[in-house]
Amino acid sequence: MWNRTKITELLKIEYPILLGPMGGGFSTPELLAAVSNAGGLGSIGAYTLSPEEIIETDKIVRTKTDKPYNINLWVNDVDERLLNYPSEKIEEIKQLFKPFFDELSIPLPDLDANIPSKFLKQVETVFELKPAVFSFIFGIPSKEILNEARKLGIKTVGAATTLDEALALEEARVDAIVATGFEAGGHRPSFLKPADESLTGTFALIQQVKAKTKTPIIAAGGIADAKGIRAALTLGADAVQMGTAFLVTDESNATPMHKAKLFSEESKNTVLSKSLTGRMGRMIANKISNAIRYETEVLPFPLQTRLMGPLRVAAIEQGKTDMYNFWSGQNAVNLKYTSAKELMEALIREMH
């Protein structure tokens, strides 16, 4: 019985398949519901949403599924370096990106480094809504927050990119750990060491975490089909979390252009870059990631996102896809399903 694991028992789901909680507007209530209704665990990546938007989204979710689902937040949603960040530095880094703005004939934006964290207000909202699962990345919430989740019967799931991070999560008594290998698309949620020093592959990380912890493990990164699920479970994972395979489905909010890129030959060239947000994330290589190498200093998160916002809009409007970022995991070669329901059905069928 491949689908009877510690995670299916813990989260009261039928199959150990979790939807990667894609933030930044990629996840939708429709995508969440397709996964949860098929017996997996659907997710909403809510780190960019205000408390009011989280409530609105949750209302829609509840009209589409009565099954368990997950709301995901970022514990650390503003880089500490932003505090008293020098305005000369902002200007200096803006100049680094000026050639791209010039190419699109748009001005550089005015930027304000004063960006407050949303996390605590968002957590209060999650506690009001009481989803089955509250997952988080970029750190560990306070003891008070984790205790409150326990009291409310909400399962907590943290993300680790190294064994040390997994051990810290276990010590904090989270209910499950997502072992996030460097193959994963989107941001690297490292929190103990810099992301570029936390690059363990998924299959090595599963085995390290399995050997040293007792907490149930969810494997993430480079898993896109039943073979990947089987391999992860064989190595000791209790479930898998899949992002890119669901990003290309009709239910996801990725643009048609993004989905086309993931199905194209270009998807085999992914790179870890800080050029878009100021934090390291895996995306399809483009003109900007090639020019702004990883070691180049960019603005702290999320100020870099605000710098790049107008550029992204203009790049899409002008059809300059080589200047737009397309998040992707390292394994987009065998993507074939454009319906989340059909993808879930295929994964379940092929696992039997």
Image: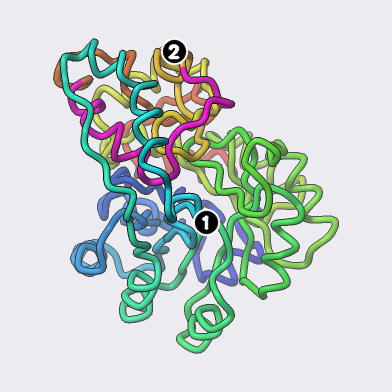
Q: Residue at x 46, y 14 (%)?
A: 291
Image x and y of residue 226, in percent:
58, 37
Residue drawn 24% across the image and 10% down it: 103
Type of residue at label 2? Glu
Q: Which residue is mark 2?
A: 266
Mark 2 closeness class: few <14, some 14–19, many ≥20 residues within 10 Å: some
124 above or below 251? below
Give the residues in magenta.
292-314
With 47 as the anchor, is 314 left or right in this view? Answer: left
Q: For mark 1, what is the residue?
A: 137
Name the foreground residue: 115 vs 192: 115
Which of discs 1 and 2 lies nearer the camera? The answer is 1
Q: Nearer the viewer, residue 342 or 21?
A: 21
Would residue 271 be counted in the magenta stretch? Answer: no
Q: Quadrant of residue 284?
A: top left
Residue 231, visible in the rendered structure: no
Residue flagged by tag 1: what amino acid is it? Ile
Q: Secondary structure at mark 1?
A: strand
Secondary-structure class at tag 2: helix
Please count the marks in the image: 2
State the separation of the CA atoms marked 1 and 2: 28 Å
